[in-house]
Amino acid sequence: MNVPFDRYVSFKNADWEGKSQRVMAKLQSHIDAADNPFWGYFAKKRTELNEKQGLDDLRVLHNYLPTLREILEESGDDETLAMLEDLEVTCM
């Protein structure tokens, strides 16, 4: 019997989708400001990973977690950094 695997079953009631969306919304201001070359690259890869590979934003954020953390720390965006860290602890 072929049963689909839900890799997010352990995140039930963790609101991983909502948290991922909120982090991405906060990151959008950095992407729009384009004050670091990484943001253009990140936006392009997000689209590519979402559309071509079918990865959701939680996975995209996980893929770039160390870089995101470093850039957010350098930019002093403590609010987005805290949201990202909460997402990491509860959903990654």
Image (cartoon, helix red, strand yellow):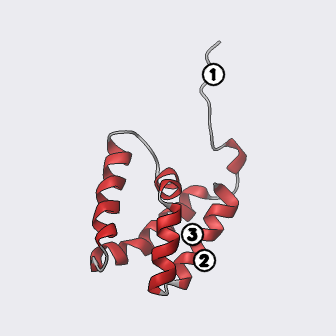
The residue carrying pointer 1 sits among few (fewer than 14), some (14 to 19) or many (20 or more) residues within 10 Å by Cα, namely few
Q: Earlier in the sequence, mark 1 or mark 3?
A: 1
x and y percentages locating residue 11 in the rendered image = 68, 50
Residue at (33, 69) in percent of width and height: 39
* SS type, badge 1: loop
Q: Earlier in the sequence, mark 1 or mark 2?
A: 1
The residue under label 2 is which amino acid type? Ala
x and y percentages locating residue 29 in the rendered image = 36, 78
Residue at (44, 85) in percent of width and height: 75
Residue picked out by circle 3: 84
Mark 1, mark 2: which one is toward the viewer? 2
The residue under label 1 is which amino acid type? Val
> As drawn, which residue projects farthest toward the top?
1
The residue under label 3 is which amino acid type? Leu
Residue 3 tag number: 1
Quadrant of the rendering where the C terminus is positioned: bottom right
Quadrant of the rendering where the N terminus is positioned: top right
Residue at (47, 59) in percent of width and height: 64
Residue at (29, 80) in percent of width and height: 35
Residue 13, image quadrant: bottom right
* SS type, badge 2: helix
Q: Nearer the viewer, residue 71 or 27?
A: 71
Residue picked out by circle 2: 82
Label total for image: 3
Instruction: Give how far apart the Cα atoms at labels 2 and 3 are.
Output: 5 Å
